[in-house]
Amino acid sequence: MTQTHVLTGAGSGIGLAVAHRLSERGDRLVLVARDAARARELTTARPGSSAIVADLRHPESLAAAVRDAGVPDAIDSIVHAAGVVDLGPVAELPIEAWVSQLTVNLIAAAELTRLLLPAVRAARGHVLFVNSGAGLSAHPDWSAYAASKHGLKALADALRGEEAPHGVRVTTVYPGRTATPMQERVHEQEGRGYDAGAFIDPESAATAIVTALDLPRDAVMSDVTVRPGPR
């Protein structure tokens, strides 16, 4: 049976890999895009998909964007795969870096989930958060990003208990370092050379995500850690 999924971050990295998997099997995608041009680009690449035009840096705009998009009354899953990262020590990290990461990585995810929960409840659906190893352990220079991802774990844990009576499943996936444009940016900020072959393939992370979504309804994969395998 065809399912409907709302995805953020579907333009690159893990989100792109998940969007490809779901669209290839005939599921309907509703893709969150930062502006109209990006929406046209994403939906053209995925025939039959539609878009919610909203900039996650401004979560206060999401309510109107969801309303204008005519989102279906039943949604089988929300996959939160969008994220931003800016590294730096606490002593030097500007407030803008804190605000942007907490806003995009956490607040926008909470608000989009809130707005779409009635439709997810109607389908007895699934909310899946693509977190990070930084959501489990914070290292030097990762304070703001890790704080946003620790917060995302808290959001998922609270939501899981709240929505269980409505039949909604909640999963957090914690990928280790994955070969994505974000990882390339991290290496630039760290001042290190980047070798995509040294990290998890986004397709491998997508396999974990789609497996969690497809798990029979008698079970839920609540927390899934994906780490690089032996080389």
Image (spheres, helix red, strand yellow):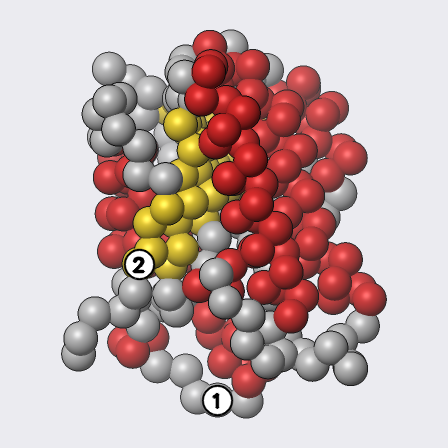
Report the residue marked by disc 2: 226
Image quadrant of residue 189? bottom right
Residue 192 numbered mark, or none: 1
Which is nearer the N-term, disc 2 or disc 1? 1
Residue 126 numbered mark, or none: none
Identity of the residue drawn at 80% across and 72% down: 94
The image shows residue 223 at horizontal and vertical percentages of 37, 46
Disc 2 element? strand
- Can residue 9 be spotted in the picture? no
Q: Residues within 10 Å of mark 1 (few under 14, many from 20)?
A: few
200 horizontally vs 96: left or right: left
Identity of the residue drawn at 67% across and 79% down: 88
The image shows residue 125 at horizontal and vertical percentages of 40, 21
- Can residue 126 be spotted in the picture? yes
The image shows residue 13 at horizontal and vertical percentages of 41, 57
- Image quadrant in which the N terminus is located: top left
- Kind of residue at badge 2: Val
42 horizontally vs 207: left or right: right
Q: Looking at the image, is mark 2 or mark 1 nearer the viewer?
A: 2
The image shows residue 3 at horizontal and vertical percentages of 33, 20
- Image quadrant in which the C terminus is located: bottom left
Above or below, 39 against 216 in this view is: below
Disc 1 element? loop
